Image: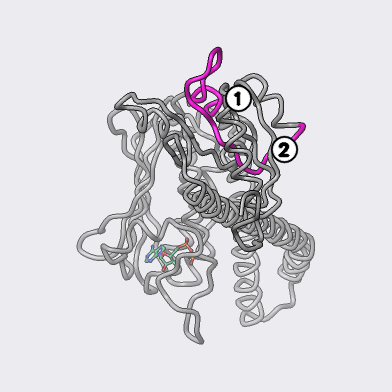
Amino acid sequence: MEGEPIFPRRADHGARILVVDDDALSRRSVRAMLERGYYQVETAEGGEEALALLSTYQPELVLLDIQMPGMDGLEVCRRIRELPNGDLLPIIFLTADERPDVHSLAFRAKGDDFLRKPVLQGELIVRIRSLMRLKRLQAEVQEERDSLLDLQKQREQLFHFIVHDLKNPLSAIQMGLELMDGEEDRSPTSKAHLRRLRDTAQAMGRMIQDILDIGRAEQIGLDLRRTRVPLDTWIPGLIKEVEAQAQSRDHRLAWGCPADLAVEADPAFLRRVLLNLLDNALKYSPSGSQTRIEAIPCGNGVRLEVRDQGEGIPEPMREQIFGKFVRLEEGGPGARSGSGLGLAFCQLVAEAHGGRIWVEDNLPRGSAFVLELPYAGVPSP
Ligand code: ADP
């Protein structure tokens, strides 16, 4: 019967639809079809009016004629897509345009669907329904994604607060250990225990700092303070820092560097990279072996190599170990402690300097970590 609703009631009924068409007859007939499908309808005679209605009427779908005087439908569609969340508004082109390339024009303007006039009521309603359902699902997925990202951010912040708060108790422990080490009446065994505790606390401190720096670097980048680092005097100082640790494992340290070789770098970050690499060399090599640091001029930069005689890194893992939390051994009773963050930190520092880091075989045994830094620092972004 004329005027009777012909579709059963559904979730999207009552949704607001904006019909944009310069032809009054066409507007009237589309309005009638939509109202029979339980939709609310507003109409606009042209592009400018349609854009103005977006904020006041807030349509949930737009039916858009293409050929209109002034701003045509393609331009209206492009402008809607540029608005915040404009890509979520379903747009169907409804046109009598006979140009052969009109479909591709419509999809290039980022329309969602296309119907030729004269349009059949059944087809129009079915297309609207499926498009609205699709967009609703898309909006739901986006909402869930946003809330997951929020949650992840909150968890990361909490993680960083906790790690940051570990710094104070750890420095209290380190200070206590220093004081105890200074007491003269200690037995050699007790001194050895103390040294091991000090090494462990130091490694923990580095791990905490790595976690904090990686977090900060991912958010705002590393704040580098570059100066000229004279490597031939700097490397021996670095070796001194790990000498006690190496001796306690019966590990020999050696180095080589041409006189006057220097690099433009942040000495504090460079020191931590090398300490991470040396710590790993000691941790993953048998006692009685040797690790060698070598500085070599190359092309327009410097290579710093840390070569150990340890277990080496299998070829398929050589890139992956620079990822966060990647470790080659499972945790377990015999496993060596570690966070899997040291090398991720080293890579961040290398890249912030415009350089790179990788690992290769140290023949005949072990691995060679190579840090390559340009003399003149980072290329401009
Ligand atoms: P961590 O040592 O805290 O686990 P790293 O990011 O420094 O984390 O290293 C990642 C993994 O790479 C280590 O767990 C280890 O399995 C492997 N690795 C790193 N350095 C060496 C090395 N010199 N020799 C053998 N394996 C190494």
Q: Residue furthest left?
A: 364
Q: Which residue is mark 2?
A: 58
Image quadrant assignment for residue 224: top right
Q: Amino acid at mark 2?
A: Gln
Task: Name the quarter showing ligand 1.
Answer: bottom left
- Under circle 1, the secondary element is helix
Q: Residue at x 37, y 54 (%)?
A: 254
Q: Position of residue 342 (x, y in %)?
A: 51, 58
Q: CA distance from mark 2 to mark 1?
A: 22 Å
Residue 200 lies left or right of residue 186; in this view the side is left
Are the two marked residues, 2 and 1, in contact with CB atoms closer than 8 angstroms? no
Q: Pick whichever of labels 2 and 1 is earlier in the sequence.
A: 1
Return the residue nearer the eye: 194 or 366.
366
Q: Is residue 1 above or below residue 223?
A: below
Residue 135: x and y, percent? 56, 50
Q: Nearer the viewer, residue 82 or 209?
A: 82
User: Is disc 2 surrounded by few (<14), some (14 to 19) or many (20+) residues within 10 Å?
Assistant: few
Please state the horizontal and vertical placement of residue 350, each as a whole percent of the image. 45, 42
* Residue placed most toward the observer, 166 or 232: 166
Question: Which circle, 2 or 1, is nearer the viewer?
Answer: 1
State the residue in front, 294 or 342: 342
| Residue lying at 56% horizontally and 39% vertically, measured from the top left | 87
Task: Indicate left or right for 143 with 125 as reference.
Answer: right
Tell whether circle 1 marks a residue whose Cβ is less than 8 angstroms from ligand 1. no
**Residue plotted at (59% across, 64% down):** 203
Residues drawn in magenta: 56-79
Residue 62, picture quadrant: top right
Relative to 338, 365 lies left or right: left
Kindly identify which residue carries mark 1. Answer: 24
- Residue 216 colored magenta? no
